[in-house]
Image: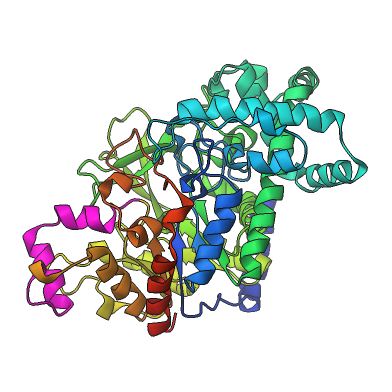
Amino acid sequence: MLAVILRTIANIFVLIAIGSFMPMSFQRASGVLLHPTSLPSPHGIGDLGRSAYQFVDFLERSGQTAWQVLPLGPTGYEHSPYTMNFSAFAGNPLLISLEQLVTEGLIQPEELVPLSSSQADRVEFERVIPHKYALLQLAFERFQTALTDEQKTAFDRFCQEQAWWLDDFVLFMALLEANAGKSWHEWSPEIARREPAALQAQMIALHDRIQFQRFLQFKFFQQWSNLRAYANQKQIKIIGDVSIYVCHNSADVWANPDLFKLDPQTLAPAYIAGVPPDYFSATGQLWGNPVYAWERSQATNFDWWIKRFKATLQYVDLVRVDHFRGFEAYWQVPAGETTAMNGEWVKAPGEEFFTTLGATLGNLPILAEDLGIITPEVEALRDRFEFPGMRILMFAFSEDASSVHLPHHYPKNSVVYSGTHDNDTAIGWWATASSSEQQFLAQYLGYRSANEIQEIHWVLIRTALASVANLAIIPLQDILGLDGRARMNDPSQYAGNWRWRYQDANLLTEALSQRLLSLTKLYSR
């Protein structure tokens, strides 16, 4: 009873404080969507090295002021940054630039042998992971034996400042390795249930592996912070991404099991997240993530969630909230189902949460991914906090003039995309669009017929930039004019996603830059 009374009092103060935060003001601008893994590099996967800085330079030359990335955390099976992420707080060590470690003397130049690939436009994770981790291990060993006073101070400061999430994460990763990758709920019961004496013993036994994980996070965030600072100096903001759900086999769930709906006996998910049948899948999408026990987050004034947003905003300027509708109501499916069809909608305390978050952070630099089954209640939650929603041009031309994705329906406070990481490329979409969709697009944009349309990717880019939406984001694949082979993710396919990358920084030509800059200026972006 006392806990309920205290929470009620706290909520009253939160509601009083609602006037103390201001919604983020988004000026008219444009940018590019590209995940860092999609950058070119000699080591099989994009990283935070030279090509990342060259990409920022391309954005500057092209008049772009935003770079949108996907979640940056370490990924597991099938490498989805949304559903297979070992932490909502950590960075992905595969993004660490090995060349920068050479500059620091942690790797010798002759040791840095490029990783050959038969598919230069695909990340071959099964080859990349052992290649990069062998060199990262070597760098760590040298880091331990040759620490300067300056490096030691920086490393110790990072570990102390980030200890509130880092300590659980590095122990989790060391235990995951020691248990051959088995999910944490299959570890010995005293470790799975985090008995203090058992954890202390493991921290001693796994000390070196724990320190290795600390080193990886230190280097990732050091390199990422430098890259972000470089972008900010060029007036380019980084748009990060908070995936609403986390992976069950993650440090987040292991360290905070009470925040999730788990089976109390097995600690496996009792319910899993997804969405009912929609545009992408006739049987819905079954993501496999555990859903939240929201009442337990409410009891702590959303402490874990607030820490999560604070941590994200240490390293990005704006945050796209993935699956925003899940903060109003979420689709939960009983564990064991093979599709997402037999689920139910459950209410979530979105207004209370964002009110609390706003009272804590002040400005809320949030973009709402409001795609899928959107109800008036979801729209009301989005608009209550003046979060800009998303509009996707590839969804617009279904012969229904009432579609919210048609530009004449856009509010200024919105973000328009030609397509997202979940869509085909513009050229890939056009090749499979029905003749009626093609003709409707032609009619809508003033062509006599679809046959007149050349370079559909630039047609969509121009349409997005010309719209009244305050922010326009274009996937790099569309700027490069790539077909469906360059698609990043197909939600109807579980395997083989998240692997595309462009092959050569020279593809970002001056002519391409000038073409994009011209349109950006023309439409006051």
Q: Quarter-wise, where is residue 365 in the image?
A: bottom right
Residue 362 belongs to the span the image colors magenta: no
Q: Is residue 318 above or below residue 26?
A: above
Nearest the viewer among 365 and 36 is: 36
Residue 445 belongs to the span the image colors magenta: yes
Q: Is residue 18 above or below residue 38?
A: below
Q: Looking at the image, which residue is at 50% across and 66% down?
A: 59
Left-right relation of 174 to 495: right
Q: Looking at the image, which residue is at 49% across and 48% down?
A: 39
Q: Position of residue 133 (x, y in %)?
A: 62, 28
Left-right relation of 416 to 48: left
Residue 193 in sight here:
no
Q: Looking at the image, which residue is at 46% across and 36% down?
A: 79
Nearest the viewer among 266 and 245 is: 245
Q: Which residues are magenta?
A: 422-450
Q: Quarter-wise, where is residue 447 in the image?
A: bottom left
Q: Position of residue 128 (x, y in %)?
A: 51, 30
